[in-house]
Amino acid sequence: MDQLTYRVGNGLYVNTTNRCTMDCTFCIRSRGSGIGNAPDLWLSKEHSREEILKDILRHDPGSYNEIVFCGFGEPTERLMDILYICGELKKQKNPPVIRIDTNGHASLIAGKDVTPLFEGLFDSVSISLNAPTAGEYEKLCRPEAGEEAFYAMLEFASKVKEYVPQTYLSVVDVLPPEKLAACREIADGIGVPLRVRHLI
Ligand code: SF4
């Protein structure tokens, strides 16, 4: 049976798709099939928004610290479905806190600015910055759109922060200090915090 949700700490993580606009050299998907207590996050198919919602609701989402759209792929590949699910979760008697971990390509995928749609549905947005320049980003993350993807991600970050106050950029903790400093400068320029996450 496909694993649509899994637990990490006191967060309930949601796995909606295996599609992604990048092929990061460090992606966990190239090194295994699961994370934590989820042994296999490869999906046999993309499940409907209703099936995913049902799976989340059976876990009593309000009892978790947060619901996190993350999984084994880029969640905004299914933007309209995840927005629907968030809307239904926010209607619950005890609505959960909702975060999305994203590569920041939602508007690039949609071909238009979709950041206003995040308002009131997501409590926080974590965007992978990964590298301080478009060239390094392309080399490290191998985006389908090439260097354009780097600028699209930065534009997404600068816009979505107007709708989701807890927006931040993230990098993995293997970057050398000078690159980390350059990433911090980028985050400062956009006006969002930079978080350094541990490479799984
Ligand atoms: S954006 Fe995330 S899911 Fe996509 S290839 Fe990179 S690490 Fe993997």
Image (tube, helix red, strand yellow):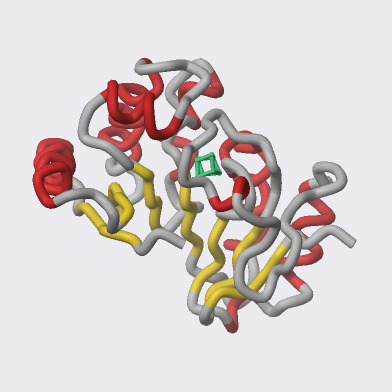
- Of residue 72 and residue 106, the one placed in the foreground of this image is 72
Name the image quarter holding residue 151: top left
Name the image quarter holding residue 60: bottom right
Residue drawn at x 30%, y 33% is 159
Residue drawn at x 50%, y 71% is 66
Q: Is residue 73 left or right of residue 182?
A: right
Point out residue 180 in the picture as x, y percentages from the top left corner.
16, 48
Which residue is situated farthest in the right direction here? 1
Residue drawn at x 36%, y 30% is 153
- Of residue 182 and residue 164, the one placed in the foreground of this image is 182
Q: Quick one: quadrant of the N terminus?
A: bottom right
- Of residue 30 and residue 99, the one placed in the foreground of this image is 30
Point out residue 31 in the picture as x, y percentages from the top left corner.
60, 52
Relative to 6, does residue 108 appear above or below in the rendering?
above
Residue drawn at x 46%, y 62% is 200
Point out residue 179 in the picture as x, y percentages from the top left corner.
16, 42
Point out residue 156 in the picture as x, y percentages from the top left corner.
35, 31
Relative to 14, does residue 62 appear above or below in the rendering?
below
Relative to 61, does residue 134 appear above or below in the rendering?
above
- Of residue 98 and residue 30, the one placed in the foreground of this image is 30
Q: Is residue 79 left or right of residue 190?
A: right
Q: How many marks?
A: 0
Q: Is residue 144 left or right of residue 45?
A: left
